[in-house]
Amino acid sequence: MDFDTRVGAYAVIVRDGHVLLTHWVVQESQRQVAGGLQSGWTLPGGGLEAGEDPEAAAVREVLEETGYVVELTRLLGTNSLHFRAEDRLPSQPRRPFHSLRLVYEGRIVAGDMRVETDGSTDDVRWVPLDEVAALSRVSLVDVGLRLWRRRSGRTESAGAHL
């Protein structure tokens, strides 16, 4: 079967009970043709460039989207997202799509928070963990926090349903 694959690398960065999130933007032209695709909060990160290692991609994407330089401390896990051919944007190839997402834990080592310009995100903020559930967010946030909690041995009740 012929299908497209996209590999992305993302970081879960938690500090003082807050998680660093970026706001992913859906262009109006995409929303009109993708059945109401909505913008939402997500983990900083994104797709690998040709020949790029996943760790380098995560560090690059976090810097581009947040202004922070990060050190990745460990791989938390992976996650797959699948789309049927008919669920893809009309401008995209009409074949199934598999998004493989590598999720790392990271920590800030330098930089100052800033919003990305001319990119796929339009905001960045530290969100209290117990407020994440109330956000309009993409599924990757819940996946990343679930992996982070499991690997960290955390069982706190705030947002534990994520």
Image (tube, rainbow, N blue to C red):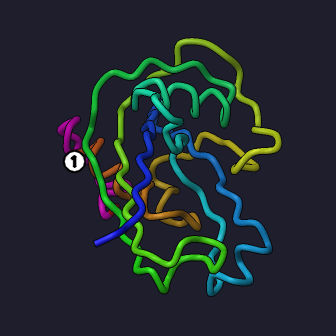
Badge 1: residue crowd in 10 Å (few <14, some 14–19, many ≥20): few
**Quarter residue 80 falls in:** bottom left
Our reading of the magenta stretch's main secondary structure is loop
Residue sitting at 40 percent across and 80 percent down?
A: 84
Q: Position of residue 57 (x, y in %)?
A: 49, 31
In front of the other: 80 or 143? 80
Point 60% across, 12% down: residue: 110
The magenta segment: 150-161
Q: Give the x, y percent position of residue 94.
A: 50, 78
Q: Please say whether residue 51 is one of the residues in the magenta stretch.
A: no
> What residue sits right under mark 1 in the picture?
155
Q: Amino acid at mark 1?
A: Thr
Picture quarter containing residue 38? Answer: bottom right
Viewed as shown, does residue 143 lie left or right of 124?
left
Quadrant that contains the N terminus:
bottom left
Number of marks: 1
The percent coordinates of residue 59 (x first, y second) are 51, 25
Give above or below for 38 relative to 131: below
Please give the name of the residue rendered at 82% of the width and 44% of the height, measured from the top-left corner: 118
Rendered residue at 25%/43% (across/down): 77
Residue nearer the viewer, 137 or 127: 137
SS of the residue under disc 1? loop
Considering depth in this image, is 147 or 79 the residue closer to the camera? 79
Looking at the picture, tell me which residue is in the foreground, 96 or 154.
Answer: 96
Q: Residue furthest front?
A: 2
Q: Is residue 154 magenta?
A: yes
Task: Please state, as top left, top right, bottom left or bottom right, where the C terminus lies in the image.
Answer: bottom left
Q: Position of residue 116 (x, y in %)?
A: 75, 38
Q: Quadrant of residue 98?
A: bottom left
